[in-house]
Image (spheres, rainbow, N blue to C red):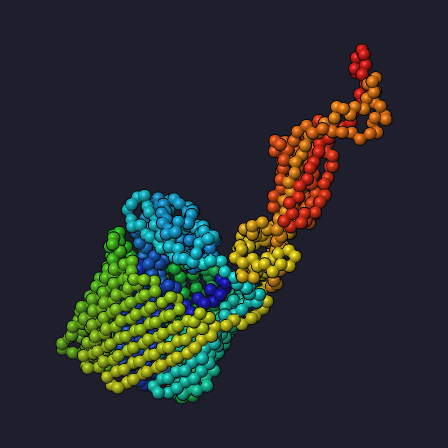
C-alpha cells in the first residue's frame, strides 16, 4: 500500500503554475498560496487562452482534496474562439473542522472536441487551525437490529493553544441506556481525542429512528461548545440468507442519448472492488458497446465520453489498460489523454514502470517510455525515466523536429507529510544535435505557523518533453503577524518564446504580484485584503496590458451554510493607450444546507472577466438546487445566465433525475443545454436504466452460515414462529415455519440456544449446542422441543418397629428371628436430603433439596432416561437409602411420583455386667 501511494505521487505530483504548448494556455492570476480556515470558501482565478488554432468548447475541473467541493455550480463548459482568452474563477468550499495543512489543487482545462488539447495550472491552499473546540463524527451505524448495542464514535479536536478540561453530555430520545468512554478528559493543544458512546437498544424496540445529541463542553468555558447529532434507524429482527460467494460489484446500463440532433444507443458495463482482501488485490473496469454511434454522450453531461478501461492493483503490481490520462514524470509526460497501457511493479525498495499512450488528435501521435525509482525510505525517492515521442508527420514538419524524439530525466523527491515536500527534476531531450534541458523545482512546506511554496520551470525552445519554450516562476509566503492576523506575499512570472523567433505567434511575458492581510474573527468570519498587480506584454508587437487592483474577501460560515463575498477595485490600461479603464469585480456566493437532503446555492458575479486589448463588463447569475428524498429519489438543477457589455449572452441549464427502485435498479434522466446570442447551441439529453449485479469471483471461505428449524419431537406439525434464536452474540427471529438463518458468520466454534423457549416445552438436546461453522458452507442444526415432565416425591426417615425384636430373653440375637422380614415405622420426613438427577442423552444435571417435610419436586424436566440419586453426606447416622440409584424414563407431560425411604442399619451388640470397654 505504501508503494502504491508513492507511485501515485511519482506519476501524478506536479506543481504547475501554468502550462501551454498543448493547445490550451492556463495562467494563474491569483496568489499561488491561498490561506483560509476550515469551513470557509476560497477562490482562485485563471486566464485561459485557446492556442489550438480552431474554435472549440472547453471543460474545466479542479482536483480537490478529499471532502472539499466546488460551490454550485461546478465550472460549466465554455466557448473560446481561436486565440481568445477568458478569465475563469474556481470557488471551493472547505468542510468544517478540516485538518489544517497545505493542499495542492490542480485546475485542468480540456477541449471537449479534442481531448488531448489540455492545460493544467496549480495553486496551494493552506488551511489554518482555529482557536476553539471542534468535533466530528467518525462512525455512526446507519441501522441495526433491535436489541443490539451500537457505538457512536467521534473525535474531539482542540484547535486552540491551551489545554482544555472537557466533558461529554448526551441526550437521546427513546430512553435507551448508554455509556460514554471516556466521559471526561483533558485534551492538549492541537491534539485530538476519540470518544465512544455505546448505546444499548431494547430488544423489543419497534421500527424507529433513534436520535442522539452529543454536546462537548469545556470547564474553562472560553470557546464554543460543539454539538453533534446522530440518527440511527432500528429495525426489528429480520431474516436473510448468507452469501457464500465473493461478488464483484458491477452494474450494466442501457442508455439512449442525443447531442445536437445526433443519436447514440449504447450498453455499458462497469465494476470494481476488492478481489482478495488479504492479498490486497483490487480491480476496476469499464466496457462500453455502442449500437448507434452518431455522437458521444457522456453520463456526466458535457464531459468526455469514456470508451473503456481495465485497472488492476495489488501490493506487487499496478496495471492500467484503455482510455484515460497517462503520466510519467512532470517534465517528460505530465498528463496525456489517449488510449494505451501502463504497468508498474514494486520490487523491494524499487518501483519499475512502463507506459504507452496513443492519440492521433494531438501533436504527438504516440508516446512510450519507462521509469525506475529507488526508495531507500518512504520519505526519499530517486527516479530515472526515458520517453520516446513519435510526432505526426505534419507536426514534425511544422516544428522542424525529427519524427521521433527521446527525453530522459532524473528526479529526486523528499516527502514529509508534516513539514512539506521538495521535488527536483532535470530532463534533456530534443533534436539529436542541440538537446535542450528543462528544470523543475517545487517546494511547499509549513514550518510552525509559516507556510511557503516555490516553483521554478525552464524549458528550451526545442525541448521534446511536456513543456516547450517556457520559463516560469511562482512563489508565495504566508506568515503570522499578531494572533489571528496573517500576511501573504506572492509573485508569479511566465515567459514563452525564449528564442524570440519571428515565426512564433506567441511572444508573451507576464508577471503578477500580490501582498495582503487576512484575519479570522472570533465569530468565525474570515476576511482578507490584498493588493494585486498584473503585467502582460507581447515581445514583437509590444501589445499587452497592465492592471492593479485591491481585493476584499469575506466569508462567514454558519451551521446550515456559508456566505462569501469578493470585491475588486482598481485600474486597467492597455500598453500604448493614453487612457485607462476601471477594473471592477463583485462576487457573491451563498451555500445553504438546512437539511441533510437539501442543498441550495445562489451566486452572482459582476465585473471585468476578460483580460484583452478591450476589457468587457460581464454579469453572471446562477442558482443550483439539490434534493435527495427518502434515499431513493435524487434531483439536481443548475442554471446560469451570462451577459457581456457587447450584447453577448449565454444560457446554461443542467439537470438530472435519479430514481432507485426497491430492488436497487436505477432510472436516470439528464439534460444539458448551452445557448448563446451568436446562435451557438449545444444540447444533450440522456436517459438510461442501470441494473446492479454481482460477478461471482470465488467461493467465500471467509464467511459461513447456519440455518435450522425449531421442531416438535415426534414430527408434530406445530410451528414456532417469532422466537429468538441466539448464536453467540448474534440473534435472529424465526419465520412463520419456525426456520432461522445466521448469515455471514466467521468460521469457528459457536453455541446455539433459544433465548425464550415456548411455555412447558424443553429442548431434547443439550443447550447451548456446541457446533462448528466452516467457511463457504451452511451448517444445519435443528432444535427439537418436547413437552416437559415433572418428578416429585418425598424422603422419609424410618426406624425399627419395637415389636419386631430379634433378641431372645438373654439379649442374644436369635437366628430364627433374624430370618423374618423386619417391620419399620415411619418417624418423619427428612428435610436435609440432597437429590440429584442426570440425563445421559442431554447431559443435563439437576439438583434440589427436600423441604422440612421431606418433600421435593423437579419441574420442567426434559423427557428421556434419567437417574436419581441421593447424597449420603446429609443422611442421619446409621441410616441408608433403601435404593441407592433409581432409573426411570420420563415421557412428555408425565407427572411421576417417587418415594424414598431412609432405613436404619441392623447392628448387633453384647451386654456385660462389669468390666472396662477397651
270 sits to left or right of 494: right
Residue located 44% across and 66% down the image:
9
Residue situated furthest right in the rendering: 816
Q: Which of 891 and 278 is in front in this view?
A: 891
Q: Nearer the viewer, residue 57 or 769?
A: 769
Residue located 39% across and 72% down the image:
659
Q: Which of 747 and 825 is in front in this view?
A: 825
Which quadrant of the structure image shows residue 528? bottom left
Q: Position of residue 225 (x, y in %)?
A: 31, 50
The C terminus, quarter of image: top right
Which quadrant of the structure image shows residue 472? bottom left
Say above or below: 68 vs 173. below
1 sits to left or right of 81: right
Say above or below: 662 vs 296. above
Q: Where is residue 407 in the image (x, y as percent from the top left)?
A: 45, 76
Which quadrant of the structure image shows residue 515? bottom left
Say above or below: 465 vs 707. below
Say above or below: 225 vs 606. above
Residue situated furthest top in the rendering: 914
Q: Can residue 494 be seen in this view?
A: no
Residue situated furthest left in the rendering: 579
Q: Position of residue 779 (x, y in %)?
A: 62, 60
Residue located 33% across and 61% down the image:
95
Q: Where is residue 907 in the image (x, y as percent from the top left)?
A: 78, 25
Residue located 45% across and 67% down the image:
8
Amino acid at each position: 500500500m505504501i508503494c502504491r501511494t508513492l507511485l501515485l505521487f511519482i506519476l501524478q505530483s506536479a506543481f504547475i503554475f501554468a502550462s501551454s504548448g498543448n493547445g490550451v494556455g492556463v495562467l494563474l492570476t491569483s496568489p499561488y498560496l491561498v490561506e483560509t480556515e476550515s469551513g470557509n470558501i476560497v477562490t482562485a482565478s485563471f486566464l485561459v487562452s485557446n492556442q489550438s488554432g480552431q474554435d472549440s468548447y472547453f471543460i474545466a475541473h479542479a482536483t480537490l482534496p478529499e471532502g472539499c467541493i466546488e460551490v454550485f455550480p461546478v465550472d460549466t463548459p465554455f466557448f473560446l474562439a481561436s486565440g481568445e482568452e477568458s478569465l475563469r474563477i474556481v470557488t471551493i468550499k472547505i468542510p468544517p473542522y478540516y485538518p489544517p495543512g497545505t493542499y495542492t489543487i490542480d485546475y485542468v482545462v480540456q477541449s471537449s472536441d479534442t481531448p488531448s488539447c489540455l492545460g493544467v495550472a496549480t495553486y496551494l491552499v493552506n488551511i489554518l487551525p482555529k482557536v476553539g473546540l471542534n468535533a466530528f463524527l467518525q462512525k455512526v451505524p446507519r441501522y441495526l437490529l433491535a436489541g443490539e448495542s451500537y457505538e457512536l464514535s467521534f473525535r474531539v479536536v482542540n484547535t486552540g493553544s491551551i489545554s482544555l478540561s472537557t466533558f461529554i453530555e448526551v441526550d437521546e430520545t427513546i430512553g435507551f441506556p448508554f455509556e460514554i468512554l471516556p466521559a471526561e478528559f483533558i485534551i492538549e493543544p492541537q491534539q485530538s481525542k476519540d470518544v465512544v458512546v455505546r448505546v444499548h437498544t431494547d430488544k423489543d424496540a419497534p421500527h424507529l429512528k433513534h436520535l442522539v445529541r452529543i454536546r462537548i463542553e469545556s470547564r474553562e468555558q472560553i470557546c464554543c461548545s460543539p454539538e453533534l447529532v446522530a440518527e440511527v434507524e432500528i429495525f426489528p429482527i429480520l431474516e436473510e440468507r448468507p452469501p457464500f460467494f465473493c461478488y464483484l460489484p458491477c452494474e450494466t446500463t442501457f442508455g439512449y442519448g442525443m447531442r445536437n440532433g445526433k443519436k447514440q444507443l449504447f450498453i455499458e458495463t462497469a465494476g470494481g472492488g476488492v478481489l482478495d482482501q488479504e492479498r490486497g488485490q483490487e480491480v476496476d473496469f469499464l466496457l462500453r458497446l455502442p449500437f448507434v454511434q452518431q455522437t458521444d454522450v457522456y453520463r456526466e453531461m458535457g464531459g468526455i465520453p469514456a470508451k473503456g478501461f481495465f485497472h488492476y492493483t495489488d501490493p506487487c503490481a499496478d496495471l492500467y489498460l484503455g482510455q484515460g490520462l497517462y503520466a510519467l514524470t512532470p517534465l517528460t509526460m505530465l498528463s496525456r489523454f489517449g488510449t494505451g497501457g501502463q504497468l508498474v511493479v514494486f520490487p523491494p525498495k524499487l518501483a519499475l514502470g512502463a507506459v504507452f499512450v496513443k492519440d492521433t488528435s494531438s501533436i504527438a501521435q504516440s508516446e512510450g517510455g519507462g521509469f525506475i525509482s529507488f526508495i531507500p525510505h518512504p520519505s526519499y525517492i530517486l527516479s530515472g525515466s526515458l520517453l520516446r515521442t513519435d510526432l505526426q508527420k505534419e507536426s514534425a514538419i511544422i516544428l522542424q523536429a525529427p519524427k521521433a524524439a527521446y527525453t530522459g530525466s532524473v528526479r529526486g523527491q523528499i516527502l514529509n507529510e508534516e513539514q512539506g515536500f521538495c521535488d527536483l527534476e532535470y530532463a534533456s531531450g530534443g533534436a539529436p544535435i542541440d538537446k535542450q534541458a528543462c528544470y523543475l523545482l517545487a517546494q511547499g512546506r509549513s514550518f510552525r505557523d509559516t507556510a511557503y511554496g516555490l516553483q521554478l520551470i525552464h524549458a528550451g525552445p526545442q525541448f521534446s518533453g511536456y513543456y516547450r519554450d517556457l520559463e516560469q516562476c511562482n512563489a508565495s509566503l504566508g506568515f503570522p503577524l499578531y494572533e489571528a492576523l496573517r500576511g501573504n506575499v506572492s509573485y508569479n512570472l511566465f515567459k514563452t518564446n525564449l528564442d524570440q523567433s519571428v515565426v512564433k505567434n506567441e511572444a508573451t511575458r507576464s508577471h503578477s504580484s500580490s501582498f495582503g492581510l487576512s484575519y479570522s474573527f472570533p465569530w468565525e468570519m474570515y476576511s482578507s485584503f490584498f493588493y494585486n498587480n498584473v503585467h502582460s506584454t507581447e515581445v514583437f508587437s509590444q501589445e499587452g496590458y497592465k492592471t492593479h487592483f485591491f481585493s476584499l474577501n469575506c466569508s462567514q460560515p454558519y451551521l446550515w451554510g456559508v456566505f462569501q463575498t469578493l470585491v475588486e477595485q482598481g485600474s486597467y490600461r492597455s500598453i500604448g493607450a493614453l487612457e485607462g479603464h476601471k477594473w471592477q469585480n463583485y462576487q457573491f456566493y451563498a451555500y445553504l444546507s438546512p437539511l441533510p437532503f437539501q442543498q441550495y446555492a445562489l451566486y452572482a458575479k459582476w465585473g471585468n472577466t476578460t483580460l484583452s486589448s478591450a476589457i468587457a463588463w460581464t454579469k453572471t447569475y446562477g442558482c443550483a438546487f439539490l434534493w435527495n428524498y427518502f434515499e431513493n429519489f435524487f434531483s439536481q438543477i443548475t442554471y446560469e445566465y451570462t451577459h457581456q457589455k457587447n450584447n453577448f449572452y449565454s444560457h446554461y441549464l443542467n439537470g438530472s433525475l435519479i430514481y432507485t427502485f426497491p430492488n436497487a435498479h436505477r432510472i436516470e434522466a439528464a439534460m444539458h443545454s448551452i445557448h448563446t446570442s451568436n446562435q451557438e447551441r449545444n444540447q444533450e439529453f440522456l436517459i438510461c436504466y442501470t441494473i446492479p449485479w454481482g460477478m461471482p469471483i470465488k467461493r467465500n471461505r471467509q464467511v459461513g452460515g447456519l440455518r435450522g428449524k425449531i421442531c416438535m419431537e415426534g414430527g408434530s406439525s406445530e410451528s414456532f414462529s417469532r422466537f429468538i434464536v441466539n448464536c453467540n452474540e448474534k440473534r435472529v427471529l424465526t419465520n412463520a415455519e419456525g426456520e432461522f438463518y445466521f448469515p455471514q458468520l466467521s468460521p469457528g466454534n459457536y453455541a446455539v440456544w433459544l433465548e425464550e423457549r415456548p411455555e412447558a416445552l424443553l429442548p431434547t438436546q443439550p443447550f447451548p449446542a456446541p457446533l462448528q461453522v466452516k467457511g463457504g458452507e451452511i451448517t444445519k442444526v435443528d432444535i427439537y422441543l418436547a413437552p416437559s415432565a415433572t418428578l416429585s416425591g418425598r424422603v422419609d426417615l424410618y426406624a425399627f418397629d419395637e415389636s419386631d425384636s430379634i433378641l431372645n430373653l438373654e439379649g442374644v440375637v436369635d437366628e430364627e428371628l433374624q430370618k423374618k422380614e423386619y417391620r419399620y415405622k415411619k418417624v418423619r420426613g427428612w428435610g436435609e436430603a440432597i437429590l440429584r438427577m442426570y440425563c445421559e442423552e442431554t447431559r443435563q444435571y439437576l439438583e434440589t433439596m427436600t423441604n422440612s417435610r421431606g418433600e421435593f419436586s423437579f419441574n420442567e424436566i426434559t423427557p428421556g432416561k434419567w437417574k436419581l440419586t441421593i447424597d449420603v453426606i446429609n443422611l442421619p447416622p446409621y441410616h441408608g437409602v433403601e435404593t441407592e440409584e433409581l432409573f426411570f424414563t420420563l415421557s412428555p407431560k408425565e407427572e411421576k411420583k417417587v418415594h424414598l425411604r431412609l432405613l436404619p442399619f441392623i447392628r448387633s451388640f453384647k451386654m456385660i455386667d462389669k468390666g472396662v470397654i477397651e
